[in-house]
Image (cartoon, grey):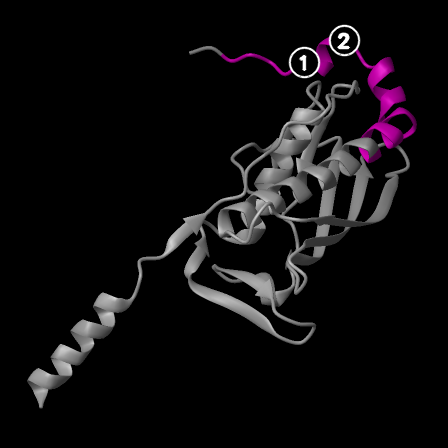
């Protein structure tokens, strides 16, 4: 009996595929002129059904599908935040963009907050990204620009690699909108204080060993 049980376990284990891990990637975008701001990308909020290592697909409005052998390479909220920070930095090259999860600790001129409500492949085969955002400027009025965003992208195929690539492109579109919000808010909330400040304050000090 013991030998039979061990043999059954061996067959089951041999039939289980090794997990494949995926990562979101930053995308190039149009560079925008902006004041030299320090921008902190706060950790993105995710709904509970996405807060798991597995890649989630929506089979219907009420049913979700999880592939046991397809997983994210790191927690999805951390990966979304770091990808958005990279995307935002590419669009605002004159700014220093860092994520809340990173090692940089400094006072930010702007804080970007994102709350994602949907981010998965829907039943029609389209990636849906829905999110709210708040761009907070540490000016004299502590101004806030809040928005709601919705993006839809059709993957090139049904493969998981194309799904993840489309999710990365959806985040890039969100970064486009966030960069525009920073540009629109900076002149009134932060820009005047930066223009009146001594020039050397706009450049981070260089520390040499």
Residue at x 54%, y 52% (from the top left corner): 76
Helix or strand or loop: what does disc 1 sit on?
loop
Assign the N terminus to one quadrant of the image: bottom left
Q: Are marks 1 and 2 in contact (CB under 8 Å)?
A: yes
Residue 54, position as x, y percentages in the image: 48, 61
Q: Which residue is mark 2?
A: 199
Which residue appears at 21% of the width and 66% of the height? Answer: 14
x, y percent for residue 148? 83, 51
**Going 79% across and 10% down the picture, which residue do you hit?**
198
Badge 2, how many Cα within 10 Å: few under 14, some, many 20+? few
Up-down relation of residue 112 to residue 68 (above or below): above
Residue 61 highlighted magenta (yes or no): no
Q: Position of residue 182 (x, y in %)?
A: 81, 32
The residue that appears at 80% across and 46% down in the rendered structure is: 134
Q: Is residue 166 left or right of residue 37?
A: left
Q: Which mark is residue 162?
A: none
- Determine the secondary structure under disc 2: helix
Most prominent secondary structure in the magenta stretch? helix
Q: Dot 1 corresponds to which residue?
A: 203
Q: Is residue 74 left or right of residue 193?
A: left
Q: Looking at the rendering, in which quadrant would you find the C terminus?
A: top left
Q: Position of residue 50 (x, y in %)?
A: 59, 62
* Depth order, front residue of 37/86: 86
Region rendered in magenta:
181-207
Mark 1 to mark 2 CA distance (whole Å): 8 Å
């Amino acid at each position: 009996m013991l030998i039979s049980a061990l043999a059954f376990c061996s067959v089951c284990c041999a039939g289980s595929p090794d997990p494949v891990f995926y990562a979101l990637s930053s995308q190039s975008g149009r560079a925008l002129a902006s004041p030299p701001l320090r921008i902190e990308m706060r950790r993105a909020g995710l709904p509970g059904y996405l807060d798991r290592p597995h890649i989630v697909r929506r089979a219907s409005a009420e049913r979700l599908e999880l592939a046991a052998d397809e997983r994210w390479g790191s927690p999805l909220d951390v990966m979304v935040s770091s990808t958005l920070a990279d995307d935002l930095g590419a669009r605002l090259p004159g700014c220093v963009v860092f994520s809340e999860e990173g090692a940089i600790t400094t006072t930010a001129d702007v804080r970007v907050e994102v709350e994602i409500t949907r981010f998965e492949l829907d039943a029609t085969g389209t990636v849906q990204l829905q999110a709210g955002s708040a761009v907070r400027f540490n000016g004299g009025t502590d101004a806030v620009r809040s928005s709601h965003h919705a993006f839809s992208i059709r993957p090139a195929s049904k493969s998981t690699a194309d799904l993840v690539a489309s999710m990365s492109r959806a985040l890039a579109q969100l970064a486009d909108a966030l960069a525009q919000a920073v540009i629109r808010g900076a002149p009134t909330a932060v820009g005047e204080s930066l223009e009146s400040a001594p020039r050397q304050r706009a450049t981070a000090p260089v520390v040499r060993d």
